[in-house]
Amino acid sequence: GINAEYGVSQDCLWFLQLSFSHSLPSSKSANMSIMSYNGSAVLAMTGKNCIAIASDTRFGIQHQTLAANFPKVFQMSDKIFLGLTGLFTDIQTFHEKLVFRLNLYKLREERDMKPSVFASLVSTLLYEKRFGPYFVEPIIAGLEGPENKPYICSTDLIGAPLLTSDFVVGGTADEALLGMCESLYKPDMDPETLFETISQCLLASVDRDAFSGWGAVVHIITPEGVSSRKLKVRQD
Amino acid sequence: VSTQSTGYKVGFWATCCNSLHILSPFTVMARRYDSRTTIFSPEGRLHQVEYAMEAISHAGAAIGILTNEGIVLAAEKMITSKLLEQGTSSEKMYKLDNHVACAVAGITADANILINYARLATQRFLFSYQFPMPVEQLVQQVCDLKQGYTQYGGQRPFGVSFLYAGWDKHDGFQLYQSDPSGNYGGWKATAIGKNNSNAQSILKQDFKEDMTLKDAQQLAVKVLSKVMESTTLSSEKLEFGVLTRQNNKTVFRSLTKKELDELIKSTTIENTDAK
C-alpha cells in the first residue's frame, strides 16, 4: 500500500526502518518514521519588515544524542535562509545541491535569487525525486524584492509548497510548534518582540519532544542585516 | 575543382600548380589540410588551431598582471556601434566562482560556452569536495575540453583565449593563460588579443616583481593605451577587473567608470611627469 503521509510505498519505508534499526547495537525501538530518525525542530515567522527563523541544535541517532551543535538553518544568501528538517544525511546533501544551484544562478544572472524563486527551485528539486525522495521538509524564509517584504514558505518532502503569511514549522516537534505559534503569534511584531515570541514557541515545543532540543539558535533578518543568537535551553 | 586521391577537394589553381610542379601561394599554403581539424599537416602543424589563434588576434586586447596584493585584468572593449545597449553585463570579464575570474579574447559566442562549462566545473568540485576548486585544476579542465576539439570529433576548435585570475589556499594568487590548442601557462604578466606581442614586450620591460596593485593598474592602462587602436583613452572603451583578498575572502570587482577615469588621469599625469 501507499503510505498516506508520504505517498511512498509502505514497503520502501518499512525496509528503510528495518535497515536502520539493524545497524544499532541495541535494537531497542522500532522507530515509527524515517523522518524522526534524527529529530529536529525548525520554525519561521514573519514580523514587521523582518523575519525570524529558528532551530534546535541536537544531532542524534534515535534515542542517542551525539552532538549539541548541529543547527538546521543555513544562510543561502544575504536575504534567504533555509531551514531543513528530517534525515540528516539528506539535509546535508540537499543543502549542498542548493548551494550548487544558487551559485550557478548568481554567476549567470549576476544578482541574488529572490526567496520566492528559491522556493520554486526547492520544490522542483524535491519533485525530481518523487519516487525516491530526499527525506527533508524544508522551510524557506527571506525578504523579497526591493521593498524587503517578508516571505516564508515550507514544502513537504516531495515539493508541495505551503505559502502562508504568518508562520511555518517543521520537524519532529511540528505539532507542538504549530500549537505554540497559533497561541503566541501576532502579526506585525517588531524584531525584538519577534525574537521573544519565536524563542518561546521553540523552547516550549522542543521541551515536549524527546528528539529535539539540546540547544537552539535564532536568526532575525531585517533589511539592515542579520542578528543571530543562541538560546540557553534544557540539555536533555 | 578536382578530387585528388586523398579525397579532399582542392581548388583549380592548386591542381594546376601541383600538376605543373610549380610553386605558388596555393601549394605553399597547403589548404588541403585545412578541412579537418583532427589531422596534422605534413609540416607537423594543426592548421585549424592556428587559424583559431589568428581569429583571436583580431579581437579586443586583454592584459593580466600578477602582484602580491592581487591580480589586475584589463581589457579593451570593442564597441561596434553607438546603438548597442551596454547594460551591466560585460563582454570581456566573467566570474567563474567566488575566487576565480577570467578575461576573454576571441569569439564571444565560443567563450560563453566555455565559461558556462567552467562555472559548472567549479560548482561540481565544490559540491563533491566542499572546498573551492584550485585555480590550476579549473584551468586544466577547460583546457582538456579545448584539446578534445583538436584531436576528436572533427569539429572546429574554440576561437577563444582566456586569462584566468584566481586565489586558492595552496598557491595564493595565480594568473594563467589558455589558448585554442588547450595549452596553458602560468604567468606574472601576459596579454592576449590584438597586438598582444607588442603588449607582451612592453610588459616584459616594465613589469617589476614587487609591484603594488596600484602600480599594476597604472601599468595596465599604459600598455593598453599603446596597444589600442583609438588614439584617445577613455573609460568607455576599457574594462578593469581586480581580484584581491579582503577579510579572508577573495573578491573580484570591476572598476566603476569614476574609478577608471581617475586611474586614466593619474596614469597620464605620471607619464607626462616622467617625460
Image (cartoon, helix red, strand yellow):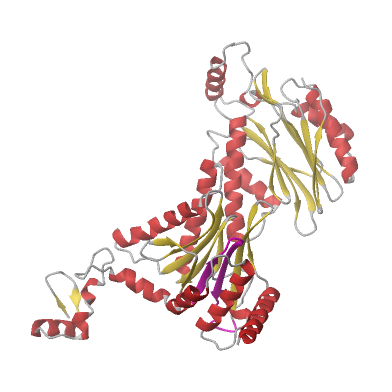
Q: Relative to A92, does residue B249 appear above or below in the rendering? A: below
Residue at the far left in the pictured view: B20
Q: Residue at x 75, y 48 (%)?
A: A142
Q: Position of residue A77 (x, y in %)?
A: 69, 50
Q: Position of residue B93 (x, y in %)?
A: 55, 67
Q: Residue at x 65, y 85 (%)?
A: B273
Please check the rendered image and state whether residue B82 is part of the magenta-colored stretch, yes or no: yes
| A224 relative to B248 in the view: left or right | right
Residue B153 visible in the shown view: no
Q: Viewer-proximal residue, B104 or B72? A: B72
| B248 relative to B124 in the view: left or right | right
Please check the rendered image and state whether residue B22 is part of the magenta-colored stretch, yes or no: no
Region rendered in magenta: B59-83
| A105 relative to B179 in the view: left or right | right
Toward which corner of the image does residue B256 lie, by quadrant?
bottom right
Split into 4 quadrants, where in the image is the N terminus of chain A? top right
Q: Position of residue B203 (x, y in %)?
A: 50, 74
Q: Viewer-proximal residue, B176 or B140? A: B176
